[in-house]
Amino acid sequence: MNSTTFRETILPLSQKIYPVAARMLGNRDDASDAVQEVMLKLWKQRKKLSKHPNITGFVVLTARNHCLDLLKKRQIKLVPDAIDINTSSNLSSHSEIEWKELNGIIGELIQELPEQQGEVLAMRDLDGLEFAEIAAATGLKIEHIRVLLSRARKHLSTQLKKIYSYE
């Protein structure tokens, strides 16, 4: 793989792995640094990359593993951060407060999920990764990922109904 192919194929994937790194590391600056380090690693492995059947999955896996290594060095537990749902600037302050409260509740509920369910939910719903990419990054089968995702969503739904039912 030459520099032009790398620039066209691999570098655009940095936009895809940045949310993964930001969620895992919990800090935008650390996530930017991690993405740069991953891109350097991939540049050094560029000859092997051209032969890989699932380049996107490999890049996501490399980013995930790099972030896990950083977290192990820091001795920090991997916990999905609160979801930041984009709100329009024209929302009233009351609605904005409700969105922030909901984001906090969902973040806490995600932390309560078993590790695999929380990770799969975050990768699919927060990071927008495809099932094949999640499978490549986690080493799980797509069918298992679907089951984990379904269970995680069902748990979140049940818990939110309990919280917001006033009866």
Image (cartoon, rainbow, N blue to C red):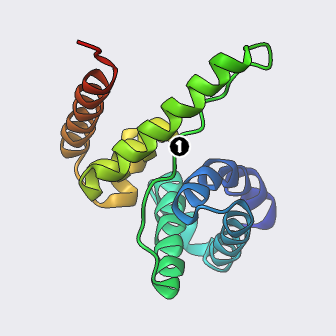
Q: Is residue 123 left or right of residue 165?
A: right
- Res 41 seen here: yes
For the point 45% across and 54% down, which residue is it? 80
For the point 22% across and 27% down, which residue is it? 158
Q: Mark 1 highlights which residue? A: 127
Depth check: give the residue in front, 159 or 115: 159
Q: Is residue 59 left or right of residue 92?
A: left
**Rendered position, 167 above or below 27:** above
- The quadrant of the image that shows the N terminus is bottom right
**Rendered position, 78 above or below 87:** below
> How would you rate the neighbour count of disc 1 (Cα within 10 Å): few for under 14, some for 14-19, many for 20 or more?
some
Q: How many marks?
A: 1
For the point 73% across and 64% down, which residue is it? 32
- The quadrant of the image that shows the C terminus is top left
Q: Position of residue 59 (x, y in %)?
A: 54, 61
Query: Going by the picture, which residue comes out furthest to the bottom?
Result: 73
Depth check: give the residue in front, 162 or 22: 162
Which residue type carries mark 1?
Asp
Q: Position of residue 163 (x, y in %)?
A: 31, 27
For the point 46% across and 54% down, which residue is it? 57
Query: Going by the picture, which residue comes out furthest to the front?
Result: 167
Q: Position of residue 35 (x, y in %)?
A: 68, 65
Q: Position of residue 62 (x, y in %)?
A: 51, 68
**Rendered position, 149 above or below 4:** above
* Residue 4 position by quadrant: bottom right
